[in-house]
Image (spheres, rainbow, N blue to C red):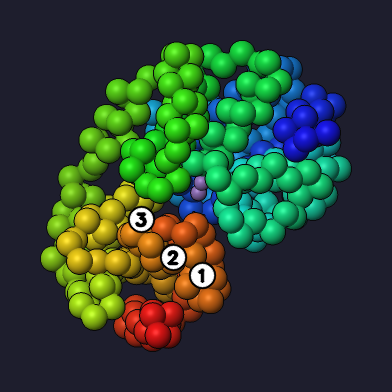
Amino acid sequence: MGDIETAISALTEADTISLSSHVNPDGDSVGSLLGMAMILQGRGKSIYACMPEPLKFPPQYDFLPGRELLADPDNQVKDVDLFIALDCSNRERLGPLQQCAERAARMLNIDHHEDNRLYGDINLVDEHASSTSELVYRVIKAAGWEIDPDVATCLYTGMVTDTGRFEHRNTSPETFAVASELAQAGADISRVIKEVYDSQSLAYTHLMGLALRRIEVIEDLGFAYSFITQRDLAETGATLPETEDLIDHLRSIRGTKVVALFKELADGKIRVSLRSRDAYEIGPVARVMGGGGHAMAAGYTSDNNIEESISDLVQELRKHQA
Ligand code: AMP
Ligand code: MN
Ligand code: MN
């Protein structure tokens, strides 16, 4: 049996199913979570869909259908028949929901990271898929389950955001074919763009101005970076989940090969987002720093302060270049 058929039998056999996105959820993890939740609900399953940190729901995805299905992770039922991890390269990405995942009878891992640790009992992992949302689409299609416009909108959102609006290297002819089928199924494609990219808050726009003015470039490395502190958030009134695509503005600077955005978290740790261009592979750098991700989009969290985190990364980039 192929991976997809195994996944479909697990979904069909289970009555109670928990499903989760990763910590710091992005468009792909939210879209695949809500899309899958609605499909399973429609098939009469008892579902417990949640994100590891509910307060961090990015406001740009507030418009997505299916949000009413999200449960509080504190009330998560542990002894379910099946736990589905979406867009998580390893168990740690489930944050506080790892315990719940361990107590489930079976674990289904659906993901597209090249560094996926195959931690599930069933692993539906394809690093060539544009997004986890695309993999969820493949499962639904292979099972012959009907995709309604709400599910299509969620999965389309995951594809649009993980491919940077079909610009990144993970965009293939297959990606466009699936996007086309989702449009056929009724995905609200103009609303997705309007809500995700053209509805930012004034507070976030001000924060973006701050971060853009601060950009520093280290020319011989082709490296551009900026940072956001907790003080910046307090002063502008913006929130971190809103900043998901700020880093793309750094990547568009001519001459850059790799860019980083350092974001100070409430606990003082620094979340580092990395993006690259051309042939530069940033995933291995993120892994050395204790994180992970794709060739062109990766990240990690540092225990050092912003200044130290910047110099740690510069040092690593120099080694990587040498
Ligand atoms: P971000 O910059 O936070 O949007 O993350 C970019 C990519 O790196 C995403 O594909 C994440 O799944 C991955 N990533 C970020 N942080 C980590 C981490 N600590 N461990 C593994 N993967 C990560
Ligand atoms: Mn993701
Ligand atoms: Mn993804």
Q: Is residue 249 visible?
A: yes
The front one of 291 and 114 is 114
Q: Secondary structure at mark 1?
A: helix
Give how far across and how far down residue 205 sits, in percent: 18, 49
Residue at disc 2, CB closer than 8 Å to ligand 1 = no
Give how far across and how far down residue 227 sits, in percent: 28, 69
Task: Check disc 3 and report the residue beneath it.
Answer: 240
The vertical placement of 137 against 167, above or below, is above
Q: Earlier in the sequence, mark 3 or mark 1?
A: 3
Residue drawn at (47%, 25%) of the image: 177
Name the kind of residue labelled 2 in the image. Glu
Residue 134 is marked as: none
Quadrant housing residue 83: top right
Q: Is residue 266 visible?
A: no
Q: Is residue 20 left or right of residue 13?
A: left
Q: Nearer the viewer, mark 3 or mark 1?
A: 1
Task: Check disc 2 and report the residue beneath it.
Answer: 281
The vertical placement of 123 against 283, above or below, is above
Q: Nearer the viewer, mark 3 or mark 2?
A: 2
Give how far across and how far down residue 74 sits, in percent: 65, 47
Name the kind of residue labelled 1 in the image. Pro
Q: Quadrant of the N terminus?
A: top right
Cα distance between the residues tagged 3 and 2: 26 Å
Residue drawn at (61%, 51%) of the image: 88
Q: Secondary structure at mark 3?
A: helix
Residue drawn at (83%, 43%) of the image: 106
Residue drawn at (17%, 70%) of the image: 214
Residue 284 is marked as: 1
